[in-house]
Image (cartoon, rainbow, N blue to C red):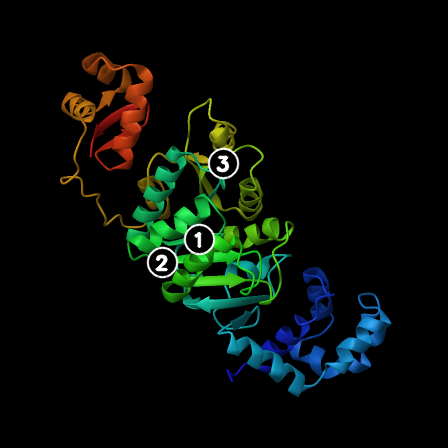
Amino acid sequence: MQIYTKNERAVIWIDIFDFLTTKKQGDILALFDEPKDVFEQFESSFDKLKNYLTKEQFDKMCYALNSQFLDAHILELESQNVKVLTYVSDGYPKFFENLDDEPIIFYYKGDVSLLNSVCVGIVGTRKPTIYGKQVTEKFSKVLALNNVTIVSGLADGVDSIAHSGALSVGGKTIAVMGSGFNCIYPKRNFELEKQIEQTGLVITEYKPNIEPAQWHYPVRNRIIAGLSKAVVITEASLKSGTMHTKDYCLEYGIDIFAVPGEVTSFTSSGANALIKNGQAEMALCPEDILDKLNVLNAYKPQVKNLQLSFEEQIIFNAIDGEMHFDEIQMKTKLDTKTLLTLLTTMELNGIIKKLAGNYYCKN
């Protein structure tokens, strides 16, 4: 059995009881000098616990107040290959230590040292457009190739693409779940979760048999924000759950980047609004994030083997130095919508680079 300190064991014990909310757990722990004192002094402390526990709840906890009960619980976790990191454990992310809503416990599988690596969150809609899928894949791959750990929530859409993009280039990724390990959601991501366990990290605040619940996901998003040096929103509507992550970033002082989309696109309305109101920096390419984080951009896209379409070749031949969109359109004589679509595709493939002011150059 894995060895935990007395303080860690006390935190594991207090998390056994489903009738305790995270806030109540924190309130109870705050009543004692150290977590281990909860375990050692609990039976004689009803007077100071009665504001947080009913007599029935107190009696239930007293019944389970023994090392054998706790050992059996830890062995059950180990039988499922689940390990535990608490707020008093070595390796606990220091960022959370100063938060009022710090997670007191993480259940995890994989490489827990990634919690203290350079992390960037990538989040967005569960129903991305083709554009959103391409942008998310490009950002996750390039960032992962530059030794940035990609953090996301294992949900459908942008989350899954971000995780898969990092894995596809041999990079690292952290999945933050809103349920326990025996209740992976969505179920279609079961294999993806197993892949992340092997080379990355999967973490959750919830014990293995806890089912997903709608209110878990906004709470889960504070962990994505707290682990990240920056968060990138690749495609999201105004009412997307991604906005919860944005709110946590603003509260915590985490840099937010948003990828702009078409002004008529519903799925980009949230990202565009964040850029417009100054809550997010515009990200036109992964290098924008790498530059802000001062991370060496060692990776350069390899484009020499790409097959260009006839119209893409016309555009490529037309670009001379840094050229404005209008100049490119004059030379290629392509209509606005077609040219914009082709330029976006070429940028995502690393053929050209978009610059400030709607200028483009060859990569």
Q: Residues within 10 Å of mark 1 (few under 14, many from 20)?
A: many
Q: CA distance from mark 2 to mark 3?
A: 24 Å
Element marked by disc 1: strand
Q: Which residue is mark 3?
A: 236
Seen in the image, is 155 located left or right of residue 147?
right
Nearest the eye: 246 or 128: 128
Q: Up-down: is 223 above or below 330?
A: below
Seen in the image, is 16 located left or right of residue 358?
right
Q: x, y percentage for residue 2?
A: 50, 82
Q: Up-down: is 216 above or below 30?
A: above
Q: x, y percentage for residue 193?
A: 44, 59
Select label 1 or label 3 by which is in front: 3
The amino acid on which the numbered mark 3 sits, given as a three-letter code, is: Ala
* Quarter of the rendering containing residue 191: bottom left
Q: Residues within 10 Å of mark 2 (few under 14, many from 20)?
A: many
Element marked by disc 2: loop
Nearest the eye: 192 or 169: 192
**Does residue 197 appear in the picture of this structure?**
yes
Q: Up-down: is 218 above or below 319?
A: below
Q: Residue furthest front?
A: 188
Q: CA distance from mark 1 to mark 3?
A: 17 Å
The amino acid on which the numbered mark 1 sits, given as a three-letter code, is: Val
Q: x, y percentage for residue 304?
A: 13, 39
**Does residue 34 appear in the picture of this structure?**
no
Residue 151, disc:
1
Q: Which residue is mark 2?
A: 172
The earlier-in-sequence mark between 1 and 3 is 1
Q: Quadrant of the C terminus?
A: top left
